[in-house]
Image (cartoon, rainbow, N blue to C red):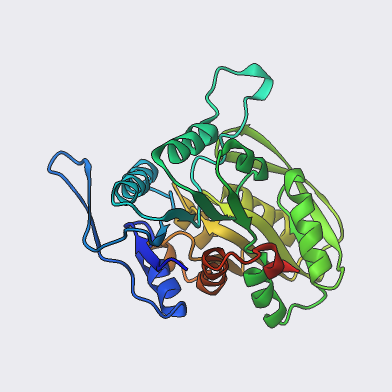
Amino acid sequence: MPDMKLFAGNATPELAQRIADRLYISLGDATVSRFSDGEVAVQINENVRGSDVFIIQSTCAPTNDNLMELVVMIDAMRRASAGRITAVIPYFGYARQDRRVRSARVPITAKVVADFLSNVGVDRVLTIDLHAEQIQGFFDVPVDNIFGTPVLLEDMQARGLENPVVVSPDLGGVVRARATAKALGDIDIAIVDKRRPRANVSEVMNLIGDVEGRDCVIVDDMIDTGGTLCKAAEALKERGAKRVFAYATHAVFSGNAAQNIGSSVLDQVIVTDSITMSKEMQATGKVTTLSLSRMLAEAIRRISNEESISAMFN
């Protein structure tokens, strides 16, 4: 069996270290820095010839910098004769640009990124909760898209929710809401129907379902500016919701997210460490972070040992 080695870029070093600790190995020695003009500079400082290499790097903000770090690290590993290279991308950026709507003159950037990674020489991709599952089909290499839901469910079950109802923040999230409701004992769901006049601006229009006097659990794959989430929480409280909790795998938290969430009626926002949280967001006092390290460490172990990934969720 090839020697397993873990390396990390600069996007999520804390998560990478937690994963390494759970696998009882040290992070590989690599220098990921910048030339004076801002270009990415990578130096692998140990032998990786024939090794089973895993590079841990979310492509979150600064998205382009983190993506280039990942790509250049993959190339460095390939040229250093690594036996197999797996890109571990807890948060896969550019996933929201996955199709052309009504033949609009826009790129399918998720496909561009998939081609970029495939062409530079990655052998496999491991990611969590892709924004659109069909992105797996953009790759010419195997993609393991695992679910962050079990980590979030553990917190939901331990929180002592009273007469809970799972809420989808939009019509597109109904499947996720139903799956979460089923996992919590087949409880009720509610749906927030919204209209979005332009990107990152949303308006809550209607609430479908009974939430009066109940704890509401909003579930989504990511939180960006938090505008949709905060307006959904307002609608729920106006309809008599007792408490409102929001759960999401990816804490993108861009733009005015800290201000939006900090001043909102949300009782708590629970996310994972797929993206390193800013100090400004931490200062709101409303955000709890759960770690994906146990799940990712187990997935990496299974990939390295040629074991089933799907068995983790059976």
Q: Residue furthest left?
A: 36
Residue 18 can be seen, yes or no:
yes
Residue 198: x and y, percent? 58, 31
Q: Name the residue at 64% across, 51% down.
A: 231
22 over 40 or under it: above or below:
below
**Observer-nearest of 182 and 242:** 182
Quarter location, residue 153: bottom right
Quarter location, residue 177: bottom right
Residue 174: x and y, percent? 78, 51
42 over 158 or under it: above or below:
above
**In the figure, is residue 193 to the left or right of 287?**
right
**Observer-nearest of 38 and 209:** 38
Query: Which of the image's four quarters has the C terminus?
Result: bottom right
72 over 44 or under it: above or below:
above
Q: Name the residue at 38% across, 72% down.
A: 17
Residue 41: x and y, percent? 21, 47
**Observer-nearest of 151 and 27:** 27
Residue 37: x and y, percent? 15, 38
149 over 198 or under it: above or below:
below
Residue 230 can be seen, yes or no:
no
Quarter location, residue 71: top left
Number of numbered discs on residues:
0
Q: Name the residue at 39% across, 39% down.
A: 120
**Observer-nearest of 252 and 118:** 118
